[in-house]
Image (cartoon, rainbow, N blue to C red):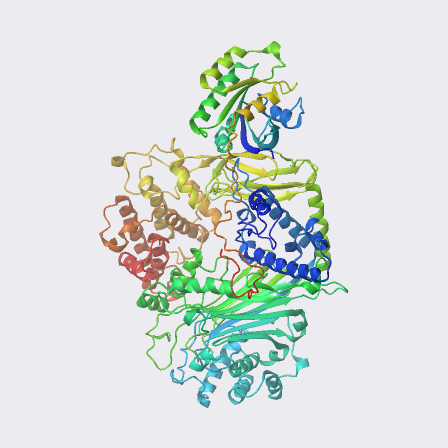
Amino acid sequence: MAQTRHNTIDLRPSDSHSVSNQSRTDDANSPISLLTHDVQGLRSVLAECKRLKTQAEEREQLDSPGDYSWMQYYTTKHTPISLLSKIPLDLRTITKPLHTLLSPASAGLPGGDEADLDLIREEWVRSKAEGLAARKQCNLRIRVGTFNVNGKMPSQDLSPWVRGVETNNGYPTVLPPLNPISPLSMGEMPKKRSDTEYDAKSVGSNTGTTESTTMSTLETISVSSSTLSSDSTIGGVDATGTPLKTDVEDTESDPDLLVFGFQELDLSTEALLYSSKTTREEAWCTAILAGLGEKGVLYEKLASKQLVGMLLMVFVKARLKEHFRDIKVCAVGAGLLGIMGNKGGAAIRLTYVPPTGEEGSVARPIIMTFVNAHLAAFDDMVDRRNADFHDLARRLVFDVTPEPTNATDPSLLTTLPIGIFESDLLFWMVYLNYRIDLSDSDVRTLLNAEPRDRNIQALLEFDQLRRCMRDGKSFQGFTEHHITRLPTYRFSAGLLTDSLGYDMKRKPAWTDRILYIKSPKTAVRQESYAGHPEITFSDHRPISADFQITMPLVDDARFQSVVRTHYHEVVNMEDSEQPPKVKLDSALLEFGHVSYEIKTPKVVVLRNVSQVSCAYRFVPLEANGPIHPLWLEIEPTTGLLLPGETTDIRITVHVTKESASELNLRSRKLDCTLILHTIFGKDHFITVHGEYQPTCFANKLSDLVKLPGPIRELAEPNKLLPEDQAISAPREVMRIINWLMTYAAETHDLFVEPGTPELVASIRESLDTGADFIFKANTDGQYDRQTKTAFGEALLQFLDSLVEPVIPRHLYSRCLQVNDRDEAFEVWISLTAFLHFISQQPGENANDGTPPTSRAELLASVFAPILFRNDPALYPPSSPVGTRRFLLFFIQ
Amino acid sequence: MSKQFQFKLVLLGESAVGKSSLVLRFVKDQFDDYRESTIGAAFLTQTVTLEDQTTVKFEIWDTAGQERYKSLAPMYYRNANCAVVVYDVTQSPSLDKAKTWIRELQRQADPNIVIALCGNKTDLSARRQVTQEEAQKYADEEGLMWGETSAKTGEGVSEIFTAIAKKLPLTAPPPRTATRGAAGATGGRGVDLNKQSATGQNEPCNC
């Protein structure tokens, strides 16, 4: 039962339960033991048991013993609660492919067909009903922001952060002004007029808001931050010259929801102990509405939750407010003793019932949950932060009263504890405290050097959160948008800072992040993910993200009825004695020649030829093994067919870098048998045959130098030359480098501009077969730019695909002594000589002012991560600053 | 109460010897003159009641006989309590193939597996190539059960399965082959429904 994702536990007698059932008849008083990993299901069962117990007791008092009418609900086949429930399934399970949740079956060992059928059937009914009941799409724009304010009160215009006006990727155009407030104060000192003016100007020039508006809003904040309530601020803004309510244009592009998370709102000791004061919340609320400028009148505060220093606030467009119902909040501490609120999380759960625009039609609600969290500090506390995340994920629980369904008696409903993951969409805005695993000087060097965007990507390779997500240690299944902004931590006023304004005592880091996880039916487009360096009064910079959410608008009544009819249709069919039977139109798939990186799809048509509905799943050969080899993909891997229905199963052979290294010099046969198991029926075999065309990509250098000719001409995979006849460097590398030396050395954006995949594939094919390159030179003997960049890309891809990087990993620490690997050495010499050569070329547009040094540095930043590939298993990784410097010795 | 046992049985043998027909006769008492070749493995169950009212339920895996699926057979005979290796009495080579299967089972399957050699298609007596004596001699040497059947007429079919049921060690129920329910009821702390605990503060289970 470990794999069930039901809202209810199946208590129908089955083989695994029969033992305990029997023992119960022996001794009615002995407890029944059942074990489950399905916490949500267990909760429902317990709530239901308690409800029934109360009901049974009441009936006993009414003196009607022997009345078992309450059991009727359980003895007739009914639609599972999970299908009709308005509580979404746990995002952590629903985002996993269904076949991974099914029982651990394999060929000849069917696992739990009954439980698997339940899961496949529910999935089928749900998607069918959602499809049939979907009216149209509903869109929602959400702007999410997070800000660690370091105990300060708002003393600057927040509009860049709350309104999302243009910034240049988080790079300040001018150095951020030093904050005049002492770091020891709580930041409540009003700002001097002159500073305010300076800020307003610098912000105004960036944001495009008129200076006068900005000025007046600032005034509002500084004068009234502690006294005015949010309502009066709206009035105040009106009074100071912004257009009247009716005149403000409510455009599509304005976010419908604004969600802001604050951390370290109040650093005072009292706040740690008593967190009841709302003064600061009011001040921030005022500042946010002021920051919205003339648009402020469109919004109203929908909900807020504060836990000591953490504050989470949700604003909504006033016209949409009535559509947000059943708002729940909760908070848990994770600081000292696991309960203190200096660390922890606050969460808000919203039930959005989108307007359908149709009389009498009510949409199925969409559940959105927002979490504002603050995790453990310090560089080396990664494990603690991961533990904090899992702890918060478990303990942040809302008390939700489920809406009554027709089948249940509303008076008997109890509240259910609902976790944050039981949503359609879950956002975490966090002061994560995850740091960068590189030395302080490396981080600062990379941040200050060009090319900045490449350097930021290089640094992100060492970001602790990215690593934890990759290793599945925290935030599994979450998405974080690509980061292009500078780190948001830590700035200080009056202390020693580097030229970017970062505190010299703290390693800069991306500590402030916004992540989300969504259900498969929800489409999320993230439109921005930016830092706001203009807002300088805290030691962190605020960040924001804009999301465009698209979900099917499902009519609830229709959904419920479609679910019921479809479910019963399928279940009634299954009650028939007939066995399920499917037919495949082909049991043998012949793929012929298959090339590296090229997807070859084939379709198998599956037809249900029986009188009953039939569920199927692919099973692995061995328990817990993969259901298909690495070079093959199957879509879909599970499903259900009604009698007479057919479905296409797409089987695609795709040899990638990962699978090619096995195939190139060992086996060229692509052979396997896939097993399609029909629930309560046969296992069907689908045999796959293919002939792999080996490539020089994804090999070892030591094997390539022992090839007697092009790899395609090799008669047998193991017919390599003996060691003493090996050539000094792979001829494939030499061919690309020679070509580049001859025709492309002056191409300025070589290796920087990505090449066209088709051209790269054609170059690779020529290298594999030994044929001439197919490109034609122009009349002047030159090649076009596209061809040149394709050759550059081919070289990069070739080096990147090598099974072992050019520089052996064990030599990273002493790579100056590289001479025990001749073939690597040869490649190295010719490669670096070539890079040196092109970095000395004047370039085709020499008057663009790019000095040769910066070109060398650019090349080093491109090649260093490929030549010194980081092994994710090795820790700590080698520094990108070091490897680039090493490479520069050769290039410059 | 009568005793109930459950055993996994696998059918092996060359293509077209009549494995699927044999199972169809045993399970449904039916016969198709034109049956398609099995591409895959079918799972069926049938119960046999012995004289002492003991019931034996067979979980039968009917496997594909074609050579190209040979590598998959071990997946189906692993954990099998008994195997029926079928040959066609009108085709001598099919007995050789059966012998190969038997050698493989003796080498790789569960050492306690009960193996029955079964000569099918006795209705085609005119075309018989394998004599009863030859097959029985081989079976005796290898210590196997042996019988002849005709899936078409039904002759000998239930007899061979009943004989296997009698030969199986009917002392203790065999271990369940399916992995389902493996978590079992171990170490569960249990929940007292009489206790009014504050739900939501703690997870109400220890998993």
From the top left corner, tell me how far across and down residue A555 is, in percent: 71, 59
Q: Is residue A841 left or right of residue A777?
A: left
Q: Is residue B25 above or below residue A155?
A: above
Q: Which residue appears farthest toward the top when viewing the image?
A: B126
Q: Residue furthest right?
A: A359
The residue closer to the viewer here, A82 or B114, is B114
Q: Tell me residue B27's x, y (percent).
A: 63, 28
In the rendered view, would you say A3 is above or below B148?
below
In the foreground, B49 or A379: B49
Q: Quadrant of residue A110?
A: top right
Q: Is residue A597 above or below residue A226?
A: above
Of A53 and A363, nearer the camera is A53
Count of numbered circles in the view: 0
Point 38% across, 66% down: residue:
A435
Q: Is residue B179 visible?
A: yes
Residue A23 found in image quarter: top right
Classify the position of the N terminus of chain B by image quarter.
top right
- Residue A887 x/y as whole percent: 29, 57
At a point 50% along the width and 47% down the height, the residue shown is B183
User: Is A468 situated above or below A535?
Assistant: above
Would you say residue A772 is visible in this rendering?
A: no
Drawn side of residue A799 relative to residue B120, left or right: left
Position of residue B82 in the picture relative to residue A767 (left or right): right
